[in-house]
Image (spheres, rainbow, N blue to C red):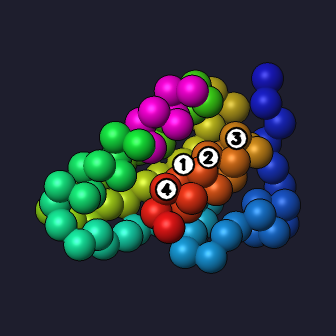
């Protein structure tokens, strides 16, 4: 089983643009167009499949919200922050 990070460990790993609420980190971004937003979702889906770790994604026209937590562990783990970094790379 993956180890749950303490609050202080999670806060240290929190990247710019991401916020933490309890056992969930999230990031909201607005893209230039709906098709661009869908392209980002498709790229993130590929990364998530490769990592076998899947974010909750909310799509509202050009605005995407990503939420990460490790449900199987019951909290935040390194897997969440690793995928958050990969999502950030897609958004550049």
For the question of whether residue 62 can be seen, the reply is yes
In which quarter of the view is residue 29 placed? bottom left
Q: Are marks 4 and 2 in contact (CB under 8 Å)?
A: no
Which quadrant of the figure contains the N terminus?
top right
**Where in the figure is residue 15, as x and y percent of width and height?**
67, 70
Q: Are marks 4 and 3 in contact (CB under 8 Å)?
A: no
- With 61 as the anchor, is 17 left or right in this view? right
Query: Residue 48 in magenta?
Result: yes
Residue numbers of the magenta segment:
44-50
Q: Secondary structure at mark 2?
A: helix
Q: Are marks 1 and 2 in contact (CB under 8 Å)?
A: yes
For the question of whether residue 23 can be seen, the reply is no
**Residue underneath mark 4:** 90
In front of the other: 45 or 5: 45
Q: Secondary structure at mark 1?
A: strand
Q: Tell me how far mark 1 sits from mark 2, CA to CA.
A: 8 Å
The circle on residue 68 is 1
Query: Residue 21 in magenta?
Result: no
Q: Tell me how far mark 4 sits from mark 2, CA to CA.
A: 11 Å
Residue located at (24% from left, 49% from top)? 38
Q: Are marks 2 and 3 in contact (CB under 8 Å)?
A: yes
**Where in the figure is residue 35, as x and y percent of width and height?**
17, 55
The circle on residue 83 is 2
Q: Is residue 11 above or below residue 24?
A: below
**Residue underneath mark 3:** 79
Q: N-terminal of the two: label 3 or label 1?
A: 1
Residue located at (40% from left, 68% from top)? 28
Residue located at (34% from left, 47% from top)? 41
For disc 3, the neighbor class at 10 Å (few under 14, some 14 to 19, many from 20) is: some
- With 33 as the anchor, is 5 left or right in this view? right
Q: Secondary structure at mark 3?
A: helix
């Amino acid at each position: 089983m993956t180890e749950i990070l303490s609050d202080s460990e999670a806060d240290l790993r929190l990247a710019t643009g991401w916020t933490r609420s309890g056992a969930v980190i999230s990031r909201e971004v607005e893209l230039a167009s709906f098709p661009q937003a869908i392209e980002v979702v498709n790229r993130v889906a590929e990364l998530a499949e490769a990592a076998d770790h899947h974010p909750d994604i909310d799509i509202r026209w050009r605005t995407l919200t990503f939420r990460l937590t490790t449900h199987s562990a019951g909290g935040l783990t390194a897997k969440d922050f690793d995928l958050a970094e990969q999502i950030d790379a897609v958004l550049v």
